[in-house]
Amino acid sequence: MSDQSSTATSPFVRYVPAGYLIVSFLWRLLTPAHEYPGRFSTYLEVGLDALVIAGLVAIRAKVPTALFWIALIAGIGLFAIRLNGTASWWTGHLIYTLSPR
């Protein structure tokens, strides 16, 4: 019994990882962070980003070429933002400001 539909060809599997990386990159690039998350949360975000990039590379044949490269660059940009400084490492955002009280 061969099933013609596969989860690898599902639009959800093809477009959600790419969309997550692109939207997450734009969010962290354009929105300032106002507080440091906990250590576990920071490492969880780093791990999730790495797994989504690995998943995107694994299904690269099913994703349109332009979308794949944009999402891959955005994924690498997520890690580049973290290398900007101590506040960027812990928050994942490019800009860190304290909110007015």
Image (tube, helix red, strand yellow):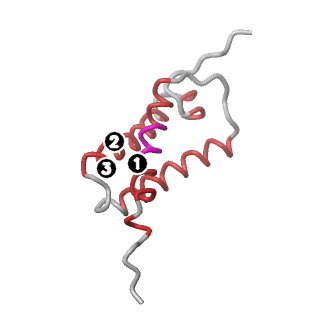
> Which residue corresponds to mark 2?
73
Whichever of labels 3 and 2 marks the residue nearer the N terminus, that label is: 3
Question: Which residue is identified by label 1?
Answer: 18
Image quadrant where residue 36 sits: top right
Q: Residue 48: percent from the left, percent from the top? A: 54, 51
Rendered position, 20 above or below 81: below
Q: Amino acid at mark 2?
A: Ile
Residue 33, numbered circle: none
What residue sits right under mark 3 in the picture?
A: 68
Amino acid type of disc 3?
Phe
Which callout, 2 or 1, points to the residue nearer the camera? 1
Image quarter hosting the N terminus: bottom left
Secondary structure under tag 2 reads helix
**Depth check, front residue: 50 or 10:** 10
User: CB of mark 1 within 8 Å of CB of mark 3?
Assistant: yes
- Regarding mark 1 in the picture, which secondary structure is present there? helix
Q: Which residues are magenta?
A: 18-23
Quadrant of the rendered image containing residue 13:
bottom left
